[in-house]
Image: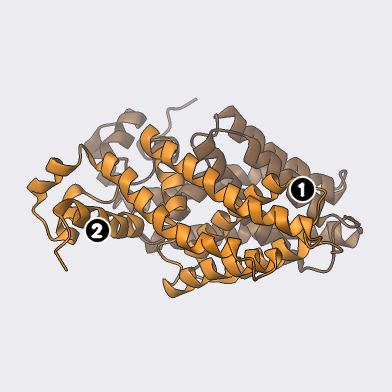
Chain colours: A orange, B brown
Amino acid sequence: MPRPSVKEEIVQAAVRVLHQRGFNATGVQDITDAAGVPKGSFYNHFESKEVLGAEALERYWQGALTSLEMLKDDNVPPMARLQSYFRKLSDVGRKTKYRPGCFVGNLSTEMSDQSPLIRERLASILAQWTREIGECVKLAQNDGSLRRDIQAKAIAAFMLNSWEGAVLRAKVDRSGLPFDQFEHLVFTALKTGS
Amino acid sequence: MPRPSVKEEIVQAAVRVLHQRGFNATGVQDITDAAGVPKGSFYNHFESKEVLGAEALERYWQGALTSLEMLKDDNVPPMARLQSYFRKLSDVGRKTKYRPGCFVGNLSTEMSDQSPLIRERLASILAQWTREIGECVKLAQNDGSLRRDIQAKAIAAFMLNSWEGAVLRAKVDRSGLPFDQFEHLVFTALKTGS
């Protein structure tokens, strides 16, 4: 297998390091060190740490899209798909001891008011994420398992935002309880006949 | 009125600046500049930026406790107190155009995995915040306006975490829609007979 290009090594290292430590706590040299490339090579490939940050975010999101495929699995009832999806995200949290949290959520609070470039990327990712969840919410409303008196889009946005809030709390408490509470509350309160 | 002490001026400036820009994007000099005091005076009063960060967080929280008093107002039904409380928090978001977000939430994602000191303070603040909301949730369950099939403590934690998630999303989207969705979903889905 050919060695990945220097640019690619920098992007991969940036996803890891920026997710773990945050954007402003990380210097360009921390990233090139993690990538095992000379610091001088950085500016051959990226105009700024901000530009790399946006690219690392995009790369992280492309990885996250794989899990979203679960929401389209016609062999599983839509409500069960939603539950399995969020349970899968919880499992990722558990495996990392809740410490890094969600890279999208971390950048949302840290960078939205600092970088228009990163904020725009975040807005578009959160919008796409909401749409994908919303499609599955709509199916669950159609088959009668999820309450229909609230718009699918609002339910999807609320689910996602509440999920990000649960990740934030899990990160502070180093506990999976916020995930359990999320699952219990969301799925108890939104299912029909509850 | 006597001029506040240098230490006090630094703490007040730190609350503003750290809330707006974040912890790692802010240098000690940014804080002393904002306070209008010489940079050299900083280490006479604080061991480190981290120690000041924890103190600024505590100061912010002391201010936030005033709004929590609403939840104890016996002249208002408990369910209405909860709604007014979160609406009041939304109003603060609207006034600041959703840009700074919540200082507690910002530090939660940025600093929980970086500073044990700040993480412990955050955990204790979020625990107290949950308890205060939980007391009012319990009253609303007792008077029959809020569903009783889920523990008050779990509802309170879910409300607070979901609120922090809504603030995060509002910060990215620069929109109050996440607050409206939070209010609609939480209070529709949790009220009895819904």
Residue at image position (76%, 69%) is B151
Give the answer, above or below, for where A76 lies relative to B130: below
Residue where numbered disc 1 is placed: B82
Q: Secondary structure at mark 2?
A: helix
Q: Label 1 lies in what chain?
A: B
Residue at 69% x, 37% y: name it: B88
SS class of the residue under badge 1? helix
Residue furthest to the front? A74
**Label of residue A13 in the image:** 2
> How busy is the neighbourhood of tag 1: few (under 14 within 10 Å), some, or many (20 plus)?
many
Position in image of residue B130 (x %, y %) = 65, 59
Indicate which label's residue lies in the foreground, 1 or 2.
2
The image quadrant of residue B32 is top left
- Give coordinates of residue B192: x percent, y percent: 88, 57
Q: Identify the residue at horizontal 39%, vertical 64% (top origin).
A: B116
Q: Is residue B122 above or below residue A57?
A: below
- x and y percentages locating residue B149 in the rendered image: 83, 69
On what subunit does the disc labeled 2 rest? A
Q: Residue at x 38, y 39 (%)?
A: A118
